[in-house]
């Protein structure tokens, strides 16, 4: 959830709340690359709507609205694979995980997650940058975000995390529900 304002550099360029300068024609574009591990990348900006990946117990679909949906294949036992979604400066992207949790990834950000929960006791991911989360409630499997020295446990909620590596501080903003924020164990 970036706040955009005109930059002192001129009206042809804009700055977001993180003071990153982008051209006005770059704002609001669905731009991202999905890394499936083993150097397999999918340019989501250019991918057409429909099935973009199937394997290892999951299917990944791009909707006509540009959102990425992860689906579990019920007839296959999959293994957990680490995927990374990255957005460039000026881009954003939405992904819906297999449990129904929605993540809106902001400009110049990345989120690293497992396609299937490696442990039945939790759902964990790593964030660098900023993302908005609408977490599907599952009391038996906590949802945990690791971001720049903090560990955020969602208790069925909507929240935003801003944790850019080049900023001195990170922020977690609660919109609904409850979160537990602690210093990440090192």
Image: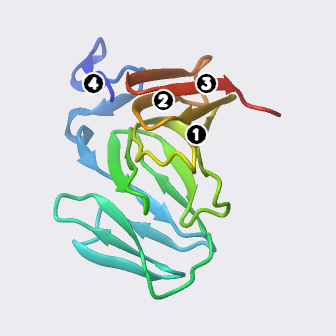
Q: Which residue is mark 3?
A: 181
Q: Are marks 1 and 2 in contact (CB under 8 Å)?
A: yes
Label 2 element class: strand
Measured from the top left, where is residue 183 in percent x and y? 71, 24
> In the displayed structure, does residue 148 sit left or right of residue 17?
right
Query: Is tag 3's residue or tag 2's residue first in the polypeptide sequence?
Result: 2
The chosen color scheme is rainbow
Residue at the disc numbered 4 = 14
- Name the residue at the top extreme: 8
**Residue position for label 1:** 145
Q: Give the position of the N terminus as an image quadrant.
A: top left
Q: Which mark is residue 161?
A: 2
| Distance between the alpha carbons at the discs numbered 3 and 2 | 11 Å
Q: SS for tag 3?
A: strand
Q: Secondary structure at mark 1?
A: strand
Give the residue displayed 24% in from the left and 47% down from the top.
29
Viewer-proximal residue among 145 and 6 = 145
Label whose residue precedes the other's in the sequence (3 or 1): 1
Image height check: is 166 above or below 123?
above
**Farthest bottom residue in view:** 75
């Amino acid at each position: 959830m970036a706040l955009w304002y005109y930059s002192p550099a001129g009206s042809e360029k804009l700055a977001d709340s993180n003071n990153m300068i982008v051209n006005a024609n770059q704002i609001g574009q669905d731009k991202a690359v999905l890394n499936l591990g083993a150097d397999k990348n999918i340019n989501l900006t250019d991918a057409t709507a429909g099935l973009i990946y199937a394997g290892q117990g999951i299917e990944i679909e791009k909707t006509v609205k540009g959102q990425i949906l992860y689906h579990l294949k019920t007839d296959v036992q999959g293994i957990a694979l680490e995927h990374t979604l990255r957005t460039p400066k000026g881009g954003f992207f939405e992904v819906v995980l297999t449990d129904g949790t929605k993540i809106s990834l902001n400009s110049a950000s990345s989120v690293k997650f497992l396609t299937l929960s490696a442990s039945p006791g939790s759902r964990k991911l790593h964030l660098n940058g900023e993302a908005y989360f609408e977490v599907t409630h599952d009391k038996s499997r906590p949802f945990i975000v690791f971001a720049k020295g903090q560990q955020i446990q969602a208790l069925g909620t909507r929240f935003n995390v801003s944790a850019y590596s080049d900023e001195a501080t990170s922020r977690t903003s609660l919109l609904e529900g409850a979160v537990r924020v602690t210093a990440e164990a090192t």
